[in-house]
Amino acid sequence: MKTFVIVLLVACALVASGYAQSSLFDRYDVNGQFVRIIGGVKGSGPGELDLPHAVDIDAGARILVADSANKRISVFGQDGKFVESWPAPGQGGLAAGSDGIVYVSDVNAGAVVLLKDGKIVDAIHVQGRPHGLSLDVATNEIYLASTEPMKPNVIKVVRKKAASN
């Protein structure tokens, strides 16, 4: 079962394989033709994936993968080669902001974790179980799809600016 798809301005689409083939995601060209598998080896080593749940592209054109079972974000170059990984919950959605902040929803903790340069810089606790995540990059408003039993809903979260001294 596929868990996430993102269509990119660079004329391709990335599809996270999620639950069925829990070690890879696929890249397709503008015509929908398969280009390559990224990942492909299930595990916890560098470049290996275990339940890739969401995918996005950051401002540096790197591919970010919410590697759920490994509780990390795995980073790949456009060529599909592994670059690095960052410790993070990654059990839900993922979105990269134009400001370099990466937003990751954690369905089990009821939170959105914010990362900058691969380090956790903040967490926003929300009601429900935030599974899906989308970001309005113009306003930094976060939209979450909650999977709370019998109460599915969409939550809008606006990140508060840090207080100035």
Image (cartoon, helix red, strand yellow):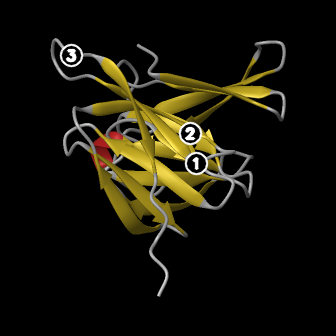
Q: Position of residue 102 (x, y in %)?
A: 52, 54
Q: Which residue is mark 2?
A: 135
Q: What is the spatial separation of the Cα atoms under label 1 and label 3, in whole angstroms?
A: 25 Å
**Residue at point 49% right, 81% down?**
164
Q: Hey, what amino acid is under mark 3?
A: Lys
Quarter of the figure that contains the N terminus? top left
Q: What is the spatial separation of the Cα atoms under label 1 and label 2, in whole angstroms?
A: 6 Å
**Residue at point 53% right, 42% down?**
141
The residue closer to the viewer here, 115 or 42, is 115
**Reading the chain from its start, which is encountered first: label 3 or label 2?**
2
Q: Nearer the viewer, mark 1 or mark 2?
A: 1
In which quarter of the view is residue 86 placed?
bottom left
Is 5 placed above or below 110 here?
A: above
User: Can residue 149 be seen in this snapshot?
Assistant: yes
Q: Which residue is mark 3?
A: 151
Q: Hey, what amino acid is under mark 2?
A: Leu
Mark 1 and mark 2 residues within 8 Å of each other at the beta carbon: yes
The residue closer to the viewer here, 141 or 2, is 141
**Residue at point 63% right, 46% down?**
139
Q: What is the spatial separation of the Cα atoms under label 3 and label 2, in whole angstroms?
A: 22 Å
Q: Secondary structure at mark 1?
A: loop
Is 109 placed above or below 101 here?
A: above
**Reading the chain from its start, which is encountered first: label 1 or label 3?**
1
Residue 126 is marked as none
Q: Which residue is mark 1?
A: 140
Q: Position of residue 31 (x, y in %)?
A: 83, 13
Total numbered labels placed on residues in the image: 3
Residue occupying the far bottom of the picture? 165
User: Can residue 48 be seen in this snapshot?
Assistant: no
Q: Hey, what amino acid is under mark 1?
A: Asn
